[in-house]
Structure formats: structure tokens, C-alpha cells
Image: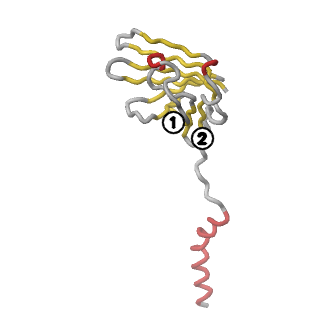
Amino acid sequence: MKNKYLLLILIPLMLPVASCWWFPNKRAPTPQYSISGSKWQEIKLRSYDQRYWGGIYHDTIYQRSSFDSLDYVQFSNNGTCLIGSGSSYIFYPSGAFGFPPGQGGLVPYSFSKKGSLYIIDTEIAIQRDTVYLASDTLRIHAVFDNDQFYNVTDAYYTR
């Protein structure tokens, strides 16, 4: 008789534990970003310096022929992105230093979605690169304030 009551008490206590085995835990789904997936190939780079009052100088544009398969950006659904470059990813205008300014590589960053924009978090705390998406074209707009003027870079990509 004691065993019967003990069993009646233990069964309700065991059900929640057993349900963990029968029904797997539901985890929050990984976010799906529209920019994630295949690589975005760089097709154009515009870099310039801009005075605080608006004047622009060292305005330089590099077209598709300046880039190769190493110049790309790839976003993942885990909030990271890789920026590959045959030359260094330029926070300062390349026009001021010549092209290419140095040998680049593959640089990892993290990014987040803010409304319709994406923000790439760089190592430089005062700078955040903004990603604009327009159907099949992606633009990364980078602005760095060097305490004298703004260094601005717009890199254009397509899939």
C-alpha cells in the first residue's frame, strides 16, 4: 500500500523531467538577415576627405577593374561578417595614400540590424560603419572623424 502511494506521488514529479526527453527544448530561432548568405563582390569604392564645413577634397573613385575576387564582404546569420580585401579595408581615404595602400586580408566584424539599416561594429569605438541595402546593391558607408576633417569611404558591392 505504501508503494502505491509513493508511486502516485512520484509520477507527477517525474513527468516534467521525462517531458524534457520526449520534447526537445525550443530555442529562439537564428535571425535571418536579408544580406546574409553568399558573398557580396566589391564593384566600386569612393573615398574622400570632407571638411567640417562641407568642402570635399581628395575625392577618388575606383571602379570594378581595380578589384578582384579577394575584395568582398560576407554576412552570416549569427551577426558576424567578413570583409575580404586584396588591399586593406580603408577607413581613411585611399585617394590620399594611393592605391593599394597595403596588403589586406580577411577581417572579421560583428554587425547588428537597426531598423532598415545594418551597423558594422569596428575596433574604433567612435566609428560605426552603416550598411545600406538597395535590392541587389549593398553600400558600406564609413565615416571617421580624425579631429581635423572627416575621412569618408563608400564601398559598393553586388551579388
Q: How is the image coloured?
A: secondary structure
In the rendered image, which residue does mark 1 sit on?
A: 111
Which amino acid is tagged 2?
Answer: Asn
Residue 77's disc is 2
Q: Which is nearer the eye, 9 or 154?
A: 154
Q: Which is nearer the eye, 18 or 108?
A: 108
Q: Residues within 10 Å of mark 1 (few under 14, many from 20)?
A: many
Residue 117 sits above or below residue 46 on the image: below
Residue 92's disc is none
Q: What residue is drawn where x is 60% and y is 39%?
A: 76
Q: What element carries label 1?
A: strand
Tell me residue 28's x, y (percent). Answer: 58, 49
Q: Horizontally, is 38 left or right of 53 in the view?
A: right
Residue 42 sits above or below residue 111 on the image: above
Q: Which of marks 1 and 2 is nearer the N terminus?
A: 2
Q: Which is nearer the eye, 68 or 151?
A: 68
Quadrant of the image for the N terminus?
A: bottom right
Residue 80 sits above or below residue 146 on the image: below
Quadrant of the image for the C terminus?
A: top right
Q: What residue is drawn where x is 35% and y is 23%?
A: 146
Which amino acid is tagged 1?
Answer: Phe
**Outermost left residue:** 147
Q: Horizontally, is 102 left or right of 52 in the view?
A: right
Q: Residues within 10 Å of mark 2 (few under 14, many from 20)?
A: some
Q: Could you tell me how far apart the alpha carbons at marks 1 and 2 are, in whole angstroms? A: 10 Å
Tell me residue 65's x, y (percent). Answer: 64, 18
Q: What element carries label 2?
A: loop
Q: What residue is drawn where x is 61% and y is 24%?
A: 42
